[in-house]
Amino acid sequence: MSACRPAQPSPAPRPRRARTYAGTARNLGTLARVLRRGGLVAAPTETVYGLAANALDPAACEKIFVAKARPQTDPLIVHIDALADLARLAHVNAPALLLAQKFWPGPLTLVLPKTDLVPAIVSAGLPSVAVRQPSHPLFRRLIRLAGVPLAAPSANPFGYVSPTTAAHVQAGLGDKISHILDGGPCAVGLESTIVDLRDPARPRLLRPGAISRAQLEETLGQPVLAPRRRRQPAAAAQIAPGLLTRHYSPHTPVQLHPCFTPAAIARSGPTHAWVFLAKPTIRSRTAATNLFWLDSRGDLGRVAHRLFAVLRQLDHAGFARIHVELAPGHAGLADAINDRLRRAAAR
């Protein structure tokens, strides 16, 4: 009689990965049902990819915080399909209506007093809510088919560089979620402008974005207060997302510069990456390996579009430090780009 063979260990199970869906009518219907049943779907907006759930379902929204490892002190933006839906979620005032009529659908978020329909988990327990109407056609159709407003922060681990492609979402959350809608690269590449309109007499810019403070003031016909630059304690409930001192951050340390000099680049050696706004004219022995640029001509729209993708690329390239050139000026897209860079570089 032969001796018993020792049991062979079972192979380790392969990690589950999210399924990626093309934006077909059938797939959108499937994903809308997932959302109605309390599930999560990562989906494209014109700004960045968002991790969406039924904004009126507290249990579904809690899954967002778990998947992202996001503190519940950081509220969620609620996305709607039509301006008429705003009054269900928020107490609308005249300035808010002016801005919505001018810039929606588009990359503008309004913070207003909330109605009882909005769960506390969405607003970090505060009596306000952040709402916007996105312009990405696939996301708009998904909201319409789901039949509910969708809470959707960026679809990435909390605090990391925001995703602007479906592949970025897969890399960051592919083992935490099951469904990713692929709508191609995001057009804007930076999160929405956020304006606080809880007090209609004192509108305040909270987070700069593609819609500038000057555009807001022109539309409202009144001044818009600048963002407060004081340090935001992470343990306190935030009025809106993206306000923490450190955010949008790669694992590799980031250092910011008003401009680059050949001497500084030469001293750093090839283990440091240097990211220019425009194609550099600086000559370097290591130019092929550690000099990068965001747009050949430094167009700020293209810079914003590529910023997060390039930071992600360099974060996985083995550099010891990433040096980035700040955008010139203090308005419009320059303000938004530099806001993201300063938070990415904060320690």
Image (cartoon, grey):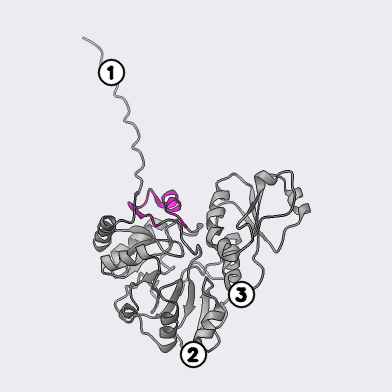
Q: Nearer the viewer, mark 3 or mark 2?
A: 3
Q: Amino acid at mark 1?
A: Arg
Q: Position of residue 128 (x, y in %)?
A: 40, 79
- Residue extending farthest to the left is 1
- Residue 188 position (above or below residue 273): below
Q: Nearer the viewer, residue 28 or 121?
A: 28
| Sequence order check, earlier mark of 3 and 2 | 2
Instruction: Identify the residue at image location x=66%, y=72%.
Output: 329
Number of the label disc, if any, that sits on residue 331: 3
Badge 1 element: loop
Other residues around mark 2 within 10 Å, as few (<14) / some (14–19) / many (≥20): few
Image quarter of the N terminus: top left
Number of the label disc, if any, that sits on residue 5: 1
Cβ atoms at labels 2 and 1 below 8 Å apart: no
Q: Amino acid at mark 3?
A: Ala
- Residue 201 position (above or below residue 178): below
For marks 3 and 1, give the CA distance.
Answer: 73 Å
Task: Name the quadrant containing residue 345.
Answer: bottom right
For marks 3 and 2, give the CA distance.
Answer: 22 Å
Number of the label disc, if any, that sits on residue 201: 2
Residue 173 covered by magenta stretch: yes
Q: Position of residue 281 (x, y in %)?
A: 73, 54
Q: Nearer the viewer, residue 17 or 309?
A: 309
Task: Name the quadrant containing residue 295.
Answer: bottom right
Badge 2 element: loop
- Residue extending farthest to the right is 263
Relative to 154, 308 lies left or right: right
For marks 2 and 1, give the CA distance.
Answer: 80 Å
The residues colored magenta run 164-183
- Residue extending farthest to the top is 1
